Amino acid sequence: MSEAPIELVALDEPYEGVISAHRDGEPSFSHVQDVADTIMAALSRGVDLIVPAALFAEIQNSFPPELPPYIKVR
């Protein structure tokens, strides 16, 4: 579990204004408040952040212009 990435899933789930997310081995990790919260969660755990390409296209302006290597768009 220690190296399992955080994976974003969808906007406005489980409720409006949040981003659903998951991390294998951490069942209580279900969503984040925003992109900044997501980045801090990945940094504090020392893991990658996986963002689906379609979701990234919707929220791209919330990310830094140059993505650090731990943020992976797939």
Image (tube, rainbow, N blue to C red):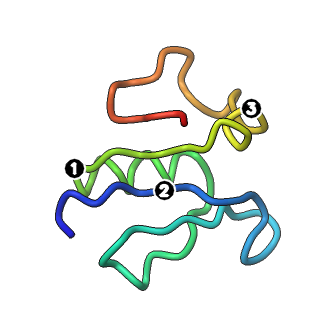
Residue 45 is situated, as x and y percent measured from the top left of the image, at 24, 57
Q: Mark 2 to mark 1: distance in Å?
A: 14 Å
SS type, badge 2: strand
* Vertical placement of residue 44 versus 14, above or below: above
**Could you tell which of marks 1 and 3 lies nearer the N-terminus?**
1
Who's the residue at 41% across and 57% down the image? 6
**Could you tell which of marks 3 and 2 lies nearer the N-terminus?**
2
- The amino acid marked with disc number 3 is Ala
The C terminus lies in quadrant: top right
Who's the residue at 39% across and 50% down the image? 40
SS type, badge 1: loop
Q: Which residue is mark 2?
A: 7
Asked if the residues shown at circle 2 and circle 1 are in contact, with their CB atoms under 8 angstroms apart, the answer is no
Examine the image and state in which quarter residue 23 appears: bottom left
> 3 left or right of 20?
left
| Number of numbered markers | 3
Asked if the residues shown at circle 3 and circle 2 are in contact, with their CB atoms under 8 angstroms apart, the answer is no
Q: Which residue is mark 1?
A: 46
Badge 3 density bin: few <14, some 14–19, many ≥20, Cα 10 Å: few
- The amino acid marked with disc number 2 is Glu
Q: Which residue is mark 3?
A: 57
Badge 2 density bin: few <14, some 14–19, many ≥20, Cα 10 Å: many
Who's the residue at 28% across and 60% down the image? 4
> 55 left or right of 42?
right
**Could you tell which of marks 2 and 1 lies nearer the N-terminus?**
2
* Vertical placement of residue 73 versus 51, above or below: above
